[in-house]
Image (cartoon, rainbow, N blue to C red):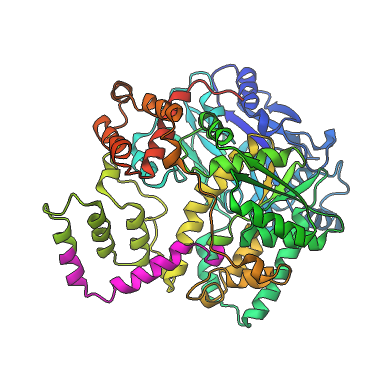
Amino acid sequence: MCGIAGFCNFAGDTEKNILKMCEIMYKRGPDGGGTWQTEDKTVTLGHRRLSVVDLTESGAQPMMSLSGRYVITFNGEIYNYQKIAKRLLSENKVSKFIGTSDTEVLLEAIEAYGLSETLKMSKGMFALAVYDRKEKKLSLARDRFGEKPLYYGWVNGAFVFASDIRAIALLSGFSNPVNPEILSLYFIHGYIPSPYSIYQDINKLDGGMILEINAPHQVYRLTSYWSLTEVALNGQNNPFKGSRAEAADELERLLKETISEQMIADVPVGAFLSAGIDSSTVVAIMQSLHDKPVKSFTIGIDAYDEAIYAKEIAKHLGCDHTEKYISENEAKAIIPLLGNMYGEPYADSSQIPTHLVSKITREAVTVSLSGDGGDELFRGYNSYRKMEAVYKKIHRIPRFVRKAAHRIILSDFVSASQHYRIRANLLKSETATDLYSNVLDYSPILHKISLNDAAVSYKHNDIDYRFLREPNHQLMLMDQRMYLPDDILAKVDRAAMAVSLETRVPLLDKDIVEFSWSLPIEYKRNAKLGKLVLRDVLYRYVPSEMMDRPKQGFGIPIERWLKDPNLRNWAEDLINQDTLKKQGFLDAGVVHQIWNDYAKNDNFIPQIWYILMFQNFLANEGKQTS
């Protein structure tokens, strides 16, 4: 895990600015750093290194290929690099390797097979920039799901990129304004969906994408080497033919293969253990493949019950388990650090426990596997079940009746009721994806927070999800395309990188994702439970009675915490009316209407936290440190 940065045609001091960019990413790569640039200084690359595979100088970056044609700066891991290395040697594409790093293998494969073909054969998480000195072409690429971040865009006519948006904002002459058009999206979701970022002219590269820009580096083009939408369609058109037990056999085989690859490192490796189905499955497979106790890690906040269950599971599996209980005051102390940690507005409050568990994990290991992705791949969220039930009920009502009821409910005599407004939005839903979007975008007041309520195309409305016949699959694809990469994976990456911890997500392995899409929905859920086939695998290692309890996320009681006098003062200072009016982004009256409804009537909505995290971002702009 590392940090990468660079630019083309930068008018300022190239050496000073690339060093500034790398320095602010120090925690992404505390073990070393380097820079490289063309002789005419038109292209500059930078790197910060967290040494995980090949700890010697032969793994240092930016790295040049043996021929001298290609230079790479790379963040991430290629888990099957040893197989690719054997292919390169067997086909005489290389005669030897200087070191043992996956970066060197990746670089030589790019020279031998081209970037797109190399990425198609690679299994891993990554963001990279590779420069072709012969063609004078810079290429950027991001892993299939977007586990590793990569921002790019224009600053004063220069093309720039970095793992951390703060590195771009530090460039001399940076004056890109906040993009007001994406604020309504942010206040609906609590994060900014790719390809957008908080700044104008700066984007996130989507997962599975390649960006190429040739000299004179003024126009770039985007291509795809992997499409999740195509994977979903292919899986449903070519369904798994075996029984559910045979599906569990195949899933277990894939998990063992994937986790075995992801445990390879030259530093200590452990795993997060939350006591849920996903992380328990990952840890169980890890322990089955390891002859020594696997290091597992859990936190609790003031006797949070899940930590008790995690301890029991770890004991059953024979893990070397670490648990730590955090006081609420310790957890609250993280809040002022969040603006600097995430670089742009981000408001999933589970960022707090994620950072805390990363911190205790980093005290013992450098790499941690996580169970993220199981809910989205195997239909785990309770919300899927609830939306399926609502969708079926709604569509028993004739369409003309629903449309009329929608208009009546929103008429003046009942329009003040939030309860009725939510139900009116649900009634107008024509598809399961409409229903999902309307549940999130439940109230007109969400569009009044920002002074700019632009209608922006994004991943919830850029394709027609009805090419998938099963409503559950439509919702799962929506989450896999946006919520998973832009919320969950961003949360884990930033929270862990703040303490220089590399995280790996085995459930998002290419083969597992593609297999999951071939499974019929009845292998994933019944009337009461989700993730059935994943449970089938887990119950081979952990008794079902140890897991038989209601699904419980690690919720942070923000609603209660903001009543604390110190946090309330912090919050009210951030949303001071004069400050809001001076900034010119938010409607001060609406913000205070929402806040006062909470402070006086205990009517808390998630957008309160979203507003505070946006204001916290603005307060931290220009004050970033590494």
Task: Tell me: 21 left or right of 249.
Answer: left
- Image quadrant holding the N terminus, namely top right
Residue at x 71% of width, y 60% of height:
313
Residue at x 72% of width, y 72% of height:
540
In the rendered image, residue 394, in percent from the top left (x then y), is placed at 29, 71
In the rendered image, residue 30, in percent from the top left (x then y), is placed at 72, 30
Image-quadrant location for residue 445: top left
Q: Which residues are magenta?
A: 377-405
Task: Tell me: 544 left or right of 95.
Answer: left
In the rendered image, residue 79, in percent from the top left (x then y), is placed at 74, 53
Q: Is residue 497 magenta?
A: no
Towards the viewer: 255 or 132: 255
Name the residue at the front extreme.
Answer: 303
Image-quadrant location for residue 359: top right
Task: Tell me: 320 left or right of 177.
Answer: right
- Asked if residue 251 shows in the view, the reply is no
Task: Tell me: 147 left or right of 311.
Answer: left
- Image quadrant holding the C terminus, namely top right
Residue at x 34% of width, y 34% of height:
180
In the rendered image, residue 33, in percent from the top left (x then y), is placed at 73, 28
